[in-house]
């Protein structure tokens, strides 16, 4: 077999649901693995959000996967799953801690069946500790990790981040852990368990706000709006333009000096009130007023062009609709049009991970419909015959069912 991508020839069983686990499986699929999305008869939770057609997030997260319906609560469904485990390189799941054990499919059981298996599990709070059994979704992990309390204006309420940051942070941590375990397996011949807690992955991302706490800074409010989380830099904010907002941030003295020249206020560069990072942080309200007065009379494009020419870090604040047609993403080939069997022509992203020696990420097949590959997989990998497949359908072990919208 010719290895063109790093995971060519590897088999991944993806029991992931919603965003966390499926995002990990998506990355492994882009790296060449054969990814079987193992779904219950009613399908992934995200699939159930729309019964007419698959919702876009599900289509985005499941390119290059095959959908296999197995009812793991039925003995025969469990038996078939274990037969697949015996052939697999990787298993992904992001159920609550203990769910796989209650199904009789926990790590210790699977390890005895397949010692080379890399078992990747991501739960809300990990496998031990006082929070182990708390319900975990992205919004609750944001709250528990401090992200919600750090988001919003100083005089406003705690606000969740607009993106599902905890799910995706955990998913990419899980992917990294699995890849590390596969490297170790090459050296030892043994698989292992990989554990990622969403909570811990999220806390790590709170570096600036936690930095203010750990450094003993006083006078820093819990929420700082669009200013630096530790109120340690200025300018660092979003500023109004005639047609929206721009984000501006001076990370070095040279940026501030260029900014002063652009404002037509070169004397500010030597003013002791603004002469260094600490001084500017003390006077950020005044700086915000000066910068905002300059940006308000210009368009976003004009401000970004002028500041980029002056080598000052800045960017327009874009809407999701604007991002969907971003010319840079277009030039990078980030968006790919696929023909989905139910949605028709649909745009989905490729992986942000580019392994230049392994070719560009590509979508070999669109996200599957529920159970689309069940019989093919059970025939090709497990050797089941037509009569056995018919029995499984009749017993509703492999038969998709219609469920209410969640």
Image (cartoon, rainbow, N blue to C red):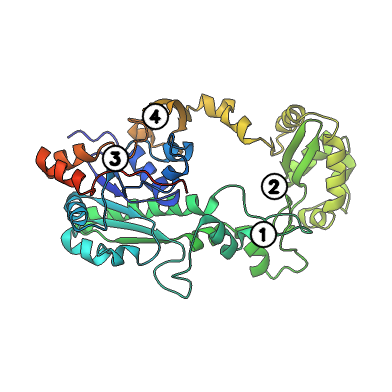
Q: Earlier in the sequence, mark 3 or mark 4?
A: 4
Q: Spatial distance from mark 2 to mark 1, Cα to Cα?
A: 21 Å
Residue density around tag 1, few if under 14, some if 14–19, many if 20 or more, within 10 Å: many
Question: Label 4, label 1: how many angstroms apart (C-alpha)?
Answer: 41 Å
**Real-space Cα separation, disc 3 to disc 4, in angstroms:** 13 Å
- Spot occupied by residue 196 in the image (x, y as percentages of width and height): 41, 60
Near mark 4 (Cα within 10 A), the count class, few <14, some 14-19 or many ≥20, is few
Q: Where 328 sits versus 7, above or below?
A: above
Nearer mark to the viewer, of 3 and 1: 3
Which quarter of the figure is the N terminus placed in?
top left
Task: From the viewer's perspective, tell me whether residue 57 is left or right of residue 97.
Answer: right
> Which residue has dot 3 on it?
371
The residue shown at (36%, 28%) is 341
Taking 362 as reference, is 279 left or right? right
For residue 259, side relative to residue 92 (left or right)? right
Secondary structure beneath disc 1?
helix
Q: CA distance from mark 4 to mark 2?
A: 48 Å
Discs 4, 1 touching: Cβ within 8 Å: no
Q: Quadrant of residue 339?
A: top left
List the residue tagged with mark 2.
Answer: 251
Q: Which residue is mark 4?
A: 342
Describe the element under mark 3 as helix, strand or loop. loop
Q: Nearer the viewer, mark 4 or mark 2?
A: 4
């Amino acid at each position: 077999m010719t290895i063109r991508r790093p995971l060519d020839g590897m088999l991944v069983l993806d029991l992931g649901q919603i965003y966390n686990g499926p995002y990990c499986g998506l990355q492994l699929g882009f790296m060449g693995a054969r990814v079987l999305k193992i779904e219950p008869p009613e399908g992934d939770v995200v699939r159930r959000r729309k019964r007419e057609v698959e919702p876009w997030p599900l289509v985005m997260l499941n390119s290059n996967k095959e959908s296999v319906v197995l009812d793991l609560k039925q003995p025969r469904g469990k038996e078939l799953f274990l037969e697949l485990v015996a052939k697999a390189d990787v298993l992904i799941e992001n159920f609550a801690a203990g769910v796989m054990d209650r199904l009789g499919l926990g790590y210790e059981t699977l390890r005895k069946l397949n010692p080379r298996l890399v078992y990747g599990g991501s739960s809300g709070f990990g496998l031990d500790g006082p929070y182990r059994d708390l319900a975990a979704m992205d919004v609750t992990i944001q709250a528990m990790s401090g992200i919600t309390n750090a988001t919003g204006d100083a005089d406003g309420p705690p606000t969740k981040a607009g993106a599902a940051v905890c799910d995706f942070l955990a998913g990419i941590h899980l992917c990294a852990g699995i890849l590390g375990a596969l490297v170790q397996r090459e050296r030892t011949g043994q698989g292992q368990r990989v554990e990622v807690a969403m909570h811990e992955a999220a806390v790590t991302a709170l570096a600036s706000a936690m930095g203010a706490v750990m450094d003993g800074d006083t006078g820093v409010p819990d929420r700082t709006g669009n200013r630096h989380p530790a109120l340690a830099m200025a300018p660092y904010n979003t500023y109004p333009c005639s047609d929206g907002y721009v984000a501006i941030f001076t990370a070095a003295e040279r940026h501030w000096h260029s900014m002063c020249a652009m404002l037509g206020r070169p004397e500010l560069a030597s003013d002791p009130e603004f002469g260094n990072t600490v001084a500017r942080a003390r006077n950020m309200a005044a700086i915000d007023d000066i910068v905002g007065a300059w940006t308000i009379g210009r368009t976003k494009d004009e401000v970004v062009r002028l500041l980029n020419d002056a080598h000052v870090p800045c960017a327009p604040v874009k809407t999701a609709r604007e991002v969907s047609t971003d010319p840079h993403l277009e030039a990078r080939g980030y968006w790919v049009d696929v023909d989905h069997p139910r949605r028709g022509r649909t745009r989905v992203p490729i992986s942000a991970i580019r392994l230049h020696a392994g070719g560009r990420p590509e979508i070999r097949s669109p996200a599957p419909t529920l159970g689309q590959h069940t019989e093919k997989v059970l025939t090709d990998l497990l050797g089941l015959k037509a009569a056995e497949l018919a029995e499984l359908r009749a017993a509703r072990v492999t038969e998709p069912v219609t469920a209410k919208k969640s």
